[in-house]
Image (cartoon, helix red, strand yellow):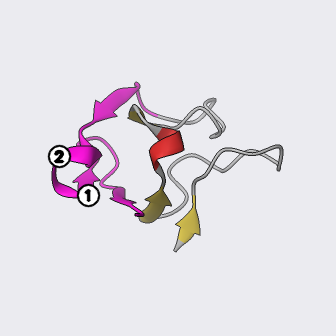
């Protein structure tokens, strides 16, 4: 599972993984995330991961899980 926390590391490839772990620092959560390369991605959509602890992107099917 890829960690999607934002950092100074190289960008995460958009739509490259099926599961991402995110933290409260990543909220509000959007797919693709700001740290992802956008040139080959779908339109940005905000996901309510804080409500249930996980959310699925309706475009690419990526599942985001909120780490405590």
Q: At which x and y percent is residue 22? A: 47, 55
SS for callout 2: helix
Q: Residue furthest front?
A: 68
Q: Residue furthest left?
A: 52
Q: Which label sits on residue 67?
A: none
Residue visible at 36% across and 56% down?
62
Q: Which of marks 1 and 2 is in front?
A: 2
Q: Mark 1 points at which residue?
A: 54
Q: Which label sits on residue 51?
A: 2
Q: In this view, does 48 lie to the left or right of 34?
A: left
Pick the residue in front: 66 or 33: 66
Residue visible at 27% across and 47% down?
49
Badge 2 local density, few (<14 within 10 Å), some, or many (20+)? few
Q: Is residue 47 magenta?
A: yes
* Residue 44 location, quadrant: top left
Q: At which x and y percent is residue 63? A: 33, 59
SS for callout 1: strand
- Per the rendered image, the range of residues in magenta is 42-68
Q: How many labels does the image show?
A: 2
Q: At which x and y percent is residue 5? A: 61, 51
Q: In this view, does 44 lie to the left or right of 46?
A: right
Q: Is residue 52 magenta?
A: yes
Q: Which residue lies furthest to the top in this view?
A: 43
Q: In this view, does 50 lie above or below 65?
A: above
* Residue 35 location, quadrant: top right
Residue visible at 17% across and 46% down?
51
């Amino acid at each position: 599972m890829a960690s999607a926390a934002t950092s100074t590391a190289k960008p995460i490839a958009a739509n490259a993984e099926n599961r991402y772990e995110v933290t409260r620092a990543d909220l509000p959560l959007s797919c693709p995330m700001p740290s992802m390369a956008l040139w080959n991605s779908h339109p940005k959509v905000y996901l309510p991961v804080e409500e249930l602890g996980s959310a699925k992107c309706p475009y690419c099917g990526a599942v985001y899980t909120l780490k405590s």
